[in-house]
Amino acid sequence: QVQLVESGGGLVQAGGSLRLSCAVSGRTISTDIMGWFRQALGKEREFVARIRWSIGATNYADSVEGRFTISRDNAKNTVYLQMNSLKPEDTAVYYCAAASATSWTYDYWGQGTHVTVSS
């Protein structure tokens, strides 16, 4: 059973930076896709970024391209989301998720970590 635990959220001023972490346990080789999603108050959950654990390939939502960077640390079994040049509209609960490379369905989710960007 894959377990995901996010950390690193908090309050930051616009223009600042935060790094979110997602500690991964129970992952098998088939659970190759790690994603970050976010959900702002009153809005639907949206895709932010993803990484293929095996090859390091990344994809980003247009809204965060060039500001956010997703990465993984094999030794620590951790996925990161480095967020720079934060904007008030980045305020949301951020979730880490995992999917298999065969289904591309995110079956595993963390509990979320809050990010608040003040103007």
Image (spheres, rainbow, N blue to C red):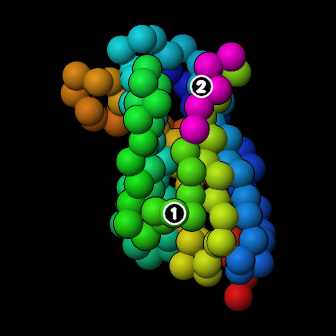
x 27%, y 34%: residue: 105
Report the residue marked by disc 2: 24
The percent coordinates of residue 18 (x first, y second) are 73, 58
Is 49 situated above or below 6?
below
Q: Nearer the viewer, mark 2 or mark 1?
A: 1
Q: Is residue 7 left or right of residue 65?
A: right
Residue 77: percent from left, percent from top = 63, 22
Task: Report the disc number at residue 20.
Answer: none
Which of the two labelled residues, at mark 2 and mark 1, occupies the earlier sequence position?
2
Give the amino acid type for the residue marked by disc 1 in the picture. Gly
Determine the image quadrant of residue 6: top right
Image x and y of residue 66, in percent = 51, 63
Task: Give the image quarter of residue 103.
Answer: top left
Region rendered in magenta: 71-75
Q: Is residue 68 above or below residue 16?
A: above
Mark 1 Cα shell of 10 Å, populated few (<14), some (14-19), many (≥20): few
Q: Which residue is mark 1?
A: 66
Among the 4 quarters of the image, the one containing residue 85: bottom right
Question: Secondary structure beneath disc 2?
Answer: strand
Using the rendered image of the protein, determine whether residue 18 is visible from the camera's viewpoint: yes
